Image (cartoon, rainbow, N blue to C red):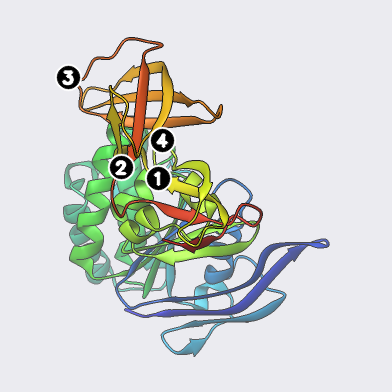
Amino acid sequence: MSSIEISNVTKRYGDKPAVDNVSLTINKHEFMVLLGPSGCGKTTLLRSIVGLERVDSGTVTIGGRDVTNRVPRKRNISMVFQSYAVFPHMTVFDNIAFGLRNQKVADNEVKRRVGEAAELLHITELLDRKPAAASGGQRQRIAVARAIAVDAEVLLMDEPLSNLDALLRLEMRAELKRLMKELQVTVVYVTHDQIEALSMGDRIAVMKDGQILQCAAPLEVYDRPADRFVGSFIGNPPMNFIPSLSPTGAAALMGIRAENIVLHEQAHPTALAGRLSVIEPLGSQNLYTVVLQSGHTVKVATRPDLHIPIDAAVWLEPMTGKALWFDVDRGNSVTS
């Protein structure tokens, strides 16, 4: 399987760049997630890799081959779309075999590859049926099986789980992660769901306005976001940003995660005073909303057996070494 090199790629629609001078290296066998809100350019970048979009400038290299001007079928790539895109008039076997037959693969080899893909995706019992007899999760497995059966160098996935319900999405996340590691395939995965990104990716490229703001391992992106947008987009709840002074004495925003704040019920010399305004019991923890004396709102995660009445006075203390500082105007990380 192959690495991917995206170098200074720009794609415009009219005067507006959907992808703006993006460079990104995706390593061999890596599971790379492109994450961001709707309209950030992640799907356009994915379509530029597969060749469904013609880039205005820059290059796309796969396995050391410049494929910038090659049509999709010449790039040795498979793609799984948001919609299942299965053919209702064909059996599951024929759906999975579709790409192989287009490549003029011999019948005995088609049978072998379809059987292997179906076994990996646990859909062998469906091969003689039509897709209408399959559930939503099974149809998505059919689409993935069709993609991996052609033995492409790279597998691209565009929001493949977004049409599934929450429980099935959780199951399929684990299934896909297991499968991709087993196949040792290079994956580029597009999603707007930060939980999917954190749980599945080897690295996450966070995008906004056609640019990559940060590309790093999931815990690095979560613990040390490059700017305020990344801290706000990654995490549930988002990172808190509190006006403060940085270690250099300059005005800054202190970034702190809800789970990295100690809540005191008595006055504390190094803590910020506030009042409890909302309690959200979440089972594994309580999520408290505290309004500081300055008027700023802060989310605090506590153990589930801590019970404090609404409107009680509380004091918040950031855990040692867990605070980050961000520039007030530009929002970028300045020190920690």
The Cα atoms of the two marked residues, 4 and 2, are separated by 12 Å
Q: Is residue 94 visible?
A: no
- Mark drawn on residue 305: 3
Residue that sits furthest to the right in the current view = 15
Q: Answer yes or no: do the residues labelled 2 and 1 have beta carbons within 8 Å? A: yes
Q: Answer yes or no: do the residues labelled 1 and 3 have beta carbons within 8 Å? A: no
Q: Position of residue 218 (x, y in %)?
A: 34, 58
Dot 2 falls on a residue whose secondary structure is helix
Quadrant location of the N terminus? Answer: bottom left
The Cα atoms of the two marked residues, 4 and 1, are separated by 11 Å
Q: Which residue is mark 1?
A: 256
Q: Answer yes or no: do the residues labelled 2 and 3 have beta carbons within 8 Å? A: no
The Cα atoms of the two marked residues, 2 and 3, are separated by 18 Å
Q: Quick one: 69 or 227, which is closer to the camera?
A: 227
Q: Which residue is mark 2?
A: 260
Q: Amino acid at mark 3?
A: Asp
Dot 4 falls on a residue whose secondary structure is loop
Q: Amino acid at mark 4?
A: Pro
Dot 1 falls on a residue whose secondary structure is strand
Q: Earlier in the sequence, mark 2 or mark 3?
A: 2
Identify which residue is drawn at 55% across, 30% down: 294
Q: Answer yes or no: do the residues labelled 4 and 1 have beta carbons within 8 Å? A: no
Q: Amino acid at mark 2?
A: Asn
Q: Which residue is mark 4?
A: 237
Q: Earlier in the sequence, mark 4 or mark 2?
A: 4
- Tag 1: Cα neighbours inside 10 Å, few (<14), some, or many (≥20)? many
The Cα atoms of the two marked residues, 2 and 1, are separated by 6 Å
Q: Position of residue 209 (x, y in %)?
A: 65, 56
